[in-house]
Image (cartoon, rainbow, N blue to C red):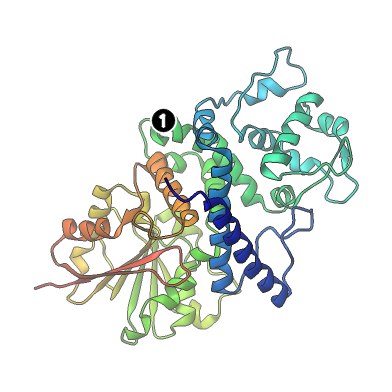
Amino acid sequence: MKNASRILELATHILENTTVVNDHLTATGHPQPSFDIDGPTNLTLSSNDAEKARIACIGASIELQDLMQGPIACLRPAVNKSQHSHKTKPYIRAQTDESPQCHKINATSLEAIYRYDIPSKVPLDDTGIPFRDLAERCDMYEPNLRRVLRYAMLYHRVFREPRAGYVMHSAASRLLVEDPAMFDALGLMFDESWQAFARGYTLAHSPSATPWSHYATHPRLAKRFASAMTSLTSNAGQSPQYLATGYPWASLPAGSTVIDMGGSEGHVSVAIATEHDHLRFVVQDLADVISRARLGDEVEEGVKERVRFVAQDFMQEQRVEGEVFLLRWVCHDWPDGYVVRILRNLRPVLRDGDKVVVNDQVMPGVGEVSSVVERQIRFFDLVMLSFFNSREREKADWESLFRNADERFQEIRIWVPEGSSFGIIEATWRSH
């Protein structure tokens, strides 16, 4: 049996690491965490030590909470999620005569908040709005509105009730008003993700199509997906700056060309080009994406003139030569067989010494990173399984992909820049 003082050990870790974060916020003049309407929506930590302390504190807090609740309570979220229903709307509309059914999943309150666009109907000031008036604006049965919002206040810190009967914004609910991408992320979760988690995206939404071809014929959903991704992928560790500074671009000869495959509107190429003025870039994506791609006025002219756009489907043979072929956060969307196909499609233009650089998740081994980081990675791994029948990959998986694509992919190197959520996988083409 393990030492019974584990809970005290965890409490000590929480205090020590909280002190580090607090001292950093005080020293840098950043605001303290708060759920008030004017509270920060993200902690701004400019120190690696403070960020490590934050992650350690969260990990210790989760373990302490689980220990204090006990094993049975830890099982309940998994059990309750299987009871979720997507019939929220009939149960809470004002004109229904049915009794509300009991769904124990925590996210039910967030689904109602999205369905009825409740955040936009609450004033963004400190006056608040009575439940009665808010129910009229939302066309909801007032008692059920109170139940939904009080649950969300307690479980998700969404909205506040500083005086009895009045609803006011919290930092989280304010974000749903001010950041449309975050609101779209809720819609993606309840309209598409839950069904995909239960049955797989294809079976749930498009039995005869991939998610990408489904989005191609449903522009409203495609627009929401793109918007949601800007919110869900906006954490600092996913910044392209880690790629721009964490790969030895300076070692490439002047005038070298980087082919940014699946590069969308070119923001990654711009980030690298800004740091390395001796490189040129070709951003490739599907024709409809390239037709909309434009570099904004904020991009310097010296960068713009080195970035051009070319329509190219990476499921077809590559037509443009370059010294580096870049795949940033592309491969995790595709099963192994498709990734092998993408790599093989490069062979017609590869010359001895050319590089393939992948910037994507490198799954850690069990216990190699903090439990907080590992939970996030394992979560996204199952999201990839549910949506695309794809996966996040460990180091050995990446090596295997290149070997299966062609034995001439050699000298495979894998590393993760300090602070980055993504690893860098480099393979060199040897023609002999």
Badge 1: residue crowd in 10 Å (few <14, some 14–19, many ≥20): some
For residue 324, side relative to residue 112 (left or right): left
Residue appearing at x 69%, y 48% in the figure? 176
Residue appearing at x 68%, y 53% in the figure? 179
In this rendering, the answer to whether 238 lies above or below 175 is: below
Task: Identify the image quadrant of residue 24.
Answer: bottom right
Residue 183 lies, in percent from the top left, at 64, 46
Q: Nearer the viewer, residue 117 or 365?
A: 365
Residue type of the residue flagged with mark 1:
Arg
For residue 187, side relative to residue 257 (left or right): right
Q: Nearer the viewer, residue 318 or 15?
A: 15
Residue appearing at x 35%, y 73% in the figure? 258
Is residue 228 visible in the rendered image? The answer is no
Residue positioned most to the left: 432
Q: Nearer the viewer, residue 398 or 53?
A: 53
For residue 145, side relative to residue 335 (left or right): right
Is residue 354 visible in the rendered image? The answer is yes
Residue appearing at x 68%, y 68% in the figure? 22
Q: Nearer the viewer, residue 363 or 339?
A: 363
In this rendering, the answer to whether 93 lies above or below 179 is: above
Label 1, on which residue? 199
